[in-house]
Every structure is written in structure tokens, then in C-alpha cells.
Amino acid sequence: MSIYVFKRAAFTLVTFVVVVSATFFLLRIAPGGPFDSERQLPPEVEANLLAAYHLDEPLYLQYLRYMGNLVRFDLGPSIKQHDFTVSELIAAGLPVSLCLGALALLIALTTGVAIGSFAAFRHNSWLDRCLSATTTLGLALPPIVTGPLLVLLFAVSLRWLPAGGLDSYLSFVLPSVALALPLAAAIAKLVRGACIEVMDQPHVTTAKAKGISNVRLAFHHVLPAGMIPILSFLGPASAALLVGSLVIEEVFALPGLGRYFVQGALNRDYTLVMGGVVVYALLILILNFVVDLVYVRLDPRIRIEDQAAAS
């Protein structure tokens, strides 16, 4: 297992460096700059601003300076929000984004596993077909569509929940549900297919022949094996939640990291965009790495391959 972990850790590190480097150079070579939206500045003032943020240096020196600061966990100052550093803005917005993502993931997992397993145990029934059609509809509707619909129903018409902002914990309900619906539909389809496949295995057939209850059959024999595909799906699913939160935080006016990231991209705030990319890349890669570690514990074939490679 140690060789497998080392390979995954090295791959994670290389991927992180590649993502940060590609983002850095793409931002610099894209047309426009952080001061282009300002009114026409005197040449000496613009030169002083560029020098203050080291934007007058050659591109390779800017890259080396940024990577050196990144090693020291220094993300630099925000170019547009002069009173804050990028670390301060991230520290303010990241907890909101993490709460939103964690709640959406919890809703998606519980709902998706429940619907998928229930449909599998009612395989080929009218209820299974209805649930399959519902999950297909859930996959077809992105959060940018379901978000406003939820606001129209629960905030405007029924007035049960706030439409936006961050006034209380209830402000997380609508955005987390909107973010979780497509993921819950995908998990439900995966769980349904995996459970149907597991239910055809000999040990499940033997358990049925012994007359054990459906509840015990589901929790002790079917779901543990059926959850393995879900673990491998959690890495990309977490990435989808992080990407989707960029839009959802704008729709619901949540002061999360995604909102700062979008504003930084619109304002060409190089350091703020780079800080957002660093955080998002780290979160996605760490989540994928953790999923890989859990997966190797559940799948003995990986341990066998690791031992064969070591010998």
C-alpha cells in the first residue's frame, strides 16, 4: 500500500503545480489587465501601480516570485480590494463555501442512496420506473435552473425560507438543495445499478434463501458492496459541488469563496483569482486523494497489485 500511496501523493503534487502554473500564465497572457477598467491614468501613476504589484517584471520572474511566495503560504494582496490580502478574503469566504458544500454533499448522499437502494429493491416495478424518470430529470436540470425555481416557490410564493443573503442558518437550505439535486440524481443511478448487480451475487442469494429481512439484507449484504462505486465517484462529485457553488453563491448572494472568485475574474484581480484556484485545486485534489486511500482499503485488488509491484 505504501507504493500506491506514494504514487498518488506524487501525482497529486504534480497536478497541483501544473494547475497553478497553467492558471498563472493564462491569466497573464489573456487580453486586458487589472487597471484597464480604471479611468485613464497618467503614465507615471500606472507605472507605479505596476511596480507595486511587480507586474512590470518579466513574466518568468513574476512566476518564480509567486511560486516562492506560495511555498511560504503567502497569496499576496488583492489588487482591486486594496484593504485586504487574498488570505483574508479567502478566510472570510471559505467557511461559507465549505458549509454550503458539506450540506449539499450530505443531502445528495442521503437522498441518492435512499432513492437508489429503494429503486433497486423494487426493480422493474412501476415505482422503480417513476424513480428512474425522476433522477433523469434531476440530472437534466442544473443548479442555475433549479435555484431560481426554488426561490420562486419557497421564498416568494410560500415565504418559508429566505431568498438570498446570509441572515441565518436557513439561508443555506435553498442553495444547498439546488446544488445537491443533480448530484443526488447521479448517486441514485449509481447506487441502483450497483445494488442490482450485487443482488445477483451468490452470497446475497444465499442470504435470501435463509429468509433474512429486507432491511438486514440491504444494510449487511447489498449496500456495503454497492457503495464502492460511490466512493470512486465522490472525488469528481466534490469537484462538481465546488464548481457549482461558484454559480449558486452568486444566485443566492452568499458571501462565499465562489463569489469572491467570480468578482476577481471579472475585475482581472490576478492575485485573488490565483488564490481561488489554489484553494479549489487543493480541496479537489485532497478529496480525491482521501477517496483513493479509502478505496484501497475497500478494494483488495489494489493491495495485491501494490505487493506485486514491491516484490
Image (cartoon, rainbow, N blue to C red):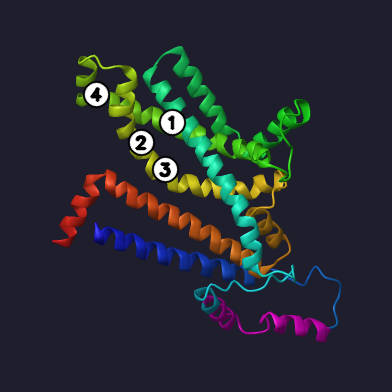
Q: Look at the image and say whether residue 45 sits in the magenta stretch.
A: yes
* 6 sits to left or right of 54: left
Q: Quadrant of the rendered structure where residue 162 is?
A: top right
Check disc 1 and report the residue beneath it. Answer: 113
Gap in Å between the C-alphas at discs 2 and 4? Answer: 15 Å
The quadrant of the image that shows the C terminus is bottom left
Tell me the kind of residue under disc 1.
Val
Residue 101 visible to an observer of this rendering = yes
Gap in Å between the C-alphas at discs 4 and 3? Answer: 24 Å
Tell me the kind of residue under disc 3.
Phe
Gap in Å between the C-alphas at discs 1 and 2? Answer: 9 Å
Tell me the kind of residue under disc 2.
Met
Check disc 3 and report the residue beneath it. Answer: 233
Gap in Å between the C-alphas at discs 1 and 4? Answer: 19 Å
Mark 3: which secondary structure? Answer: helix
Gap in Å between the C-alphas at discs 1 and 3? Answer: 13 Å
Check disc 2 and report the residue beneath it. Answer: 227
Where is 40 relative to 228, above or below?
Answer: below
Location of residue 35 in the rendering, given as x and y in whole percent from the top left corner: 77, 72
Check disc 4 and report the residue beneath it. Answer: 204
Q: Quadrant of the rendered structure where residue 216 is?
A: top left
Mark 2: which secondary structure? Answer: loop
Q: Earlier in the sequence, mark 1 or mark 3?
A: 1
Q: Please report the bounds of the magenta region as a residue range.
A: 43-67
Q: Earlier in the sequence, mark 1 or mark 4?
A: 1
Location of residue 149 in the rendering, given as x and y in whole percent from the top left corner: 70, 31
